[in-house]
């Protein structure tokens, strides 16, 4: 294991051996979910974390505080489905009260967002990404195994009304399920002023059923969209560490993003790190290892000791996810238990 010098004597920042610096912390606030998207979870769900293994709000806030004092500027709440955490509004208020205050974002399936969007915005939530892969009710039910499209649409409207703008929509395309209708999703988002981003399906499903040959690639999505609109790539310099390649639609100002996580990985510019609902730091979605913070935290570790553990985990971050390597092994934790 790589040993690091005393964290108090190292310069500030969550750096790795390749010079990348983490700025974006994804916090999974629960591993539970009320949908069962086929590319993420099995139909029967998963063995959920027992309550005593989950971080309390107080523990989460203490750990997030350690991250933000070491250079994290954006905290994204995710899961599982973050809206299932009862204390979510209080958690957002707690994060907004940290010094320095990070930007606060959330990735959600949108079910239940309607009733809480205003309170989340008032508590300090800055932005929201709602996952929506299809606007066809039947396909939605096949894909998520739940008949909740109306709830998601209501959640999106509520997010816009609450000022959580620009409202972003994330979509995963699956062959033979919703790939033929990617243009319909974009047209629907354009009409409503939502910013759509397509994401290539990654090998992070609990069932380990991902098959590269079946994946709808970024190029394929672009080709399909180009049948209906003229897509002009925005300069890559405007992209920074953002994973989406963005295109102006018919000259703009509307844009669409396409995230080629598998076919054109952006690992060299990655600025992310992750904290799971049970208190493990993961330096990459595809990491085979993680560092436990919950145990040391509950055993009385100081902030500096916890920071040392976080920095050690970040230092060990690999240069890339290696999905194309012949010896690639999918991580044990599925996306829903890591925090997407
Ligand atoms: N439940 C929330 C939601 O669906 O937005 C938050 C958690 S979910 C794991 C976060 C994001 O990961 C969603 O946009 C979802 O579409 C995406 N996702 C899940 N499994 C994926 C996979 N195998 N490949 C690519 N994206 C995936
Ligand atoms: Fe739930 Fe999100 Fe996974 Fe779908 S992608 S099953 S909404 S955690």
Image (tube, rainbow, N blue to C red):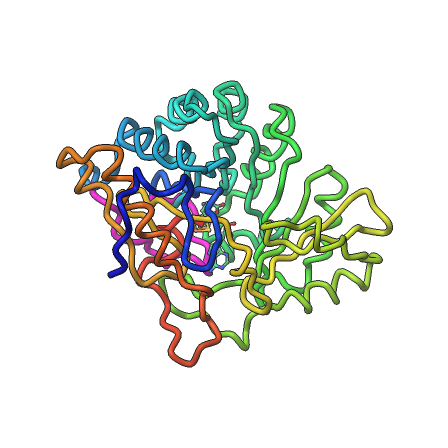
Query: Is 287 within the magenta?
Result: no
Q: As drawn, is 275 to the left or to the right of 139?
A: left
The total number of labels drawn is: 0
Residue 277 position (above or below residue 164) = below
Which corner quadrant of the image does residue 188 belong to?
top right
Which corner quadrant of the image does residue 263 belong to?
bottom right
Q: Position of residue 276 (x, y in %)?
A: 33, 45
Q: As drawn, is 98 to the left or to the right of 143?
A: left
Question: 12 or 141: which is nearer to us?
Answer: 12
Residue 253 position (above or below residue 18) = above
Q: Position of residue 126 (x, y in %)?
A: 56, 29
Which residue sits at x=62%, y=55%?
Answer: 198
Q: As drawn, is 53 to the left or to the right of 261?
A: left
Residue 71 position (above or below residue 88) = below
Which corner quadrant of the image does residue 71 belong to?
top left
Q: Position of residue 249 (x, y in %)?
A: 81, 51
State which region is magenta. Answer: 31-50
Which residue sits at x=67%, y=56%?
Answer: 245
Question: 250 or 284: which is nearer to us?
Answer: 284
Identity of the residue furthest to the right in this view: 251
Which residue sits at x=81%, y=56%?
Answer: 232
Q: Position of residue 36 (x, y in %)?
A: 42, 52
Question: 218 or 8: which is nearer to us?
Answer: 8
Which residue sits at x=43%, y=23%?
Answer: 99
Q: As drawn, is 176 to the left or to the right of 220?
A: left
Q: Main secondary structure of the magenta part?
A: loop
Q: Quadrant of the N terminus?
A: bottom left
Query: Is 32 within the magenta?
Result: yes
């Amino acid at each position: 294991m790589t040993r690091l010098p005393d964290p108090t004597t190292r310069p500030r920042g969550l750096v790795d051996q390749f010079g990348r610096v983490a700025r974006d912390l994804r916090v999974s606030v629960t591993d539970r979910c009320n949908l069962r998207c086929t590319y993420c979870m099995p139909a029967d769900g998963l063995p959920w974390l027992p309550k005593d293994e989950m971080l309390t709000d107080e523990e989460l806030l203490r750990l997030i505080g350690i991250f933000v004092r070491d250079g994290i500027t954006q905290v994204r709440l995710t899961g599982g489905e973050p809206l299932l955490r009862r204390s979510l509004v209080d958690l957002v208020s707690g994060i907004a009260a940290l010094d320095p205050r990070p930007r606060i974002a959330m990735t959600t399936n949108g079910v239940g967002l309607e009733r809480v969007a205003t309170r989340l915005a008032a508590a300090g939530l800055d932005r929201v990404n709602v996952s929506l892969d299809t606007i066809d009710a039947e396909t939605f039910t096949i894909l998520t195994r739940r008949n909740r499209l109306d709830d998601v649409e209501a959640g999106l409207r509520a997010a816009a009304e609450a000022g959580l703008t620009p409202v972003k929509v994330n979509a995963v395309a699956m062959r033979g399920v919703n790939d033929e209708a990617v243009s319909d999703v974009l047209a629907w988002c354009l009409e409503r002023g939502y910013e759509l981003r397509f994401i290539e399906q990654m090998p992070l499903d609990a069932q380990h059923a991902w098959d590269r040959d079946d994946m709808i690639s970024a190029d394929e999505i672009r080709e399909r969209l180009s049948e209906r609109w003229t897509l002009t790539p925005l300069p890559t310099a405007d992209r920074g560490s953002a994973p989406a390649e963005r295109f102006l639609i018919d000259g703009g100002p509307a844009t669409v993003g396409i995230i080629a996580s598998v076919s054109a990985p952006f690992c060299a510019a990655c600025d992310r790190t992750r904290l799971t609902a049970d208190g493990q730091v993961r330096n990459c979605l595809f990491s085979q290892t993680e560092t436990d913070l919950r145990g040391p935290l509950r055993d009385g570790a100081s902030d500096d000791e916890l920071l040392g553990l976080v920095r050690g985990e970040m230092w060990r971050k690999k240069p890339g996810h290696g999905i194309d390597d012949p010896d690639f092994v999918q991580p044990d934790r599925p996306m829903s238990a890591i925090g997407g």
